[in-house]
Image (cartoon, grey):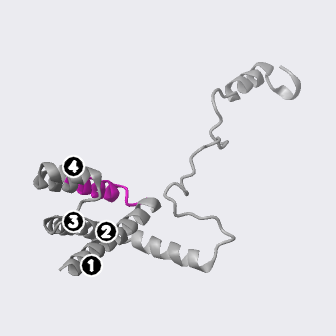
Amino acid sequence: MGEEGIDPGLVMLEQIVDQRSGVDRRVTRLSLRFPDRRLGFARREGRENRLRVSYDRVLAAYRSKPHAIAMVLLAVAVLNIADLALTLRALELGATELNPIMAALLDVDPLLAALFKATIVIGVVAIMWAMRRYRQVLEASLLLLGGFASLVLYSLGGLVLSA
């Protein structure tokens, strides 16, 4: 027995048992993932103007309403079909298709062009719906809506002027 009546073998055994192998789980490891920023909604505080803050609020409200996103994506699909119908009507009146892929498909068969366009739109809308939690996808959906709405209005204007 050693000092104070403690067996030195027992002390050594406690030291051996206390030694742990492997990584200490209490220490945080370096992580290259930033989960709060992956979706694009977390912004750094600081130099933000009022317009940016308002835009972020509108986009966050849009994100929290799946039915609104569904309506926008449905409107994109409907506007795409309207664009096809207006394009076919304009081609009957003597216009030319500016999109080289659609022009080649329309030369082969208008039904083939319609099937191609519908397939692409359904695929894009389905992908956007699946990825609707990402900021860039929400922004893209709104840009697509504005772009197709502008295209349909342009086509309608051209048909009205040609009549």
Mark earlier in primary sequence (3, 4): 3
Distance from Cα at disc 3 to Cα at disc 1:
13 Å
The crowding category of the residue bearing disc 1, from other C-alpha atoms within 10 Å (few below 14, some 14 to 19, many at least 20), is: few
Mark 2 residue type: Phe
Specify whether residue 152 is painted magenta: no
Report which quarter residue 28 is drawn in.
Answer: top right
- Which circle marks residue 148 in the picture? 2
Mark earlier in primary sequence (2, 1): 2
Distance from Cα at disc 4 to Cα at disc 1:
25 Å
- Which circle marks residue 97 in the picture? none
Magenta range = 119-134
The x, y position of residue 112, in whole percent, is 13, 51
Q: Is mark 1 on a helix, strand or loop?
A: helix
Q: What element carries label 2?
A: helix
Give the residue number, with chain letter if any, for mark 3: 95
Tally of marks: 4
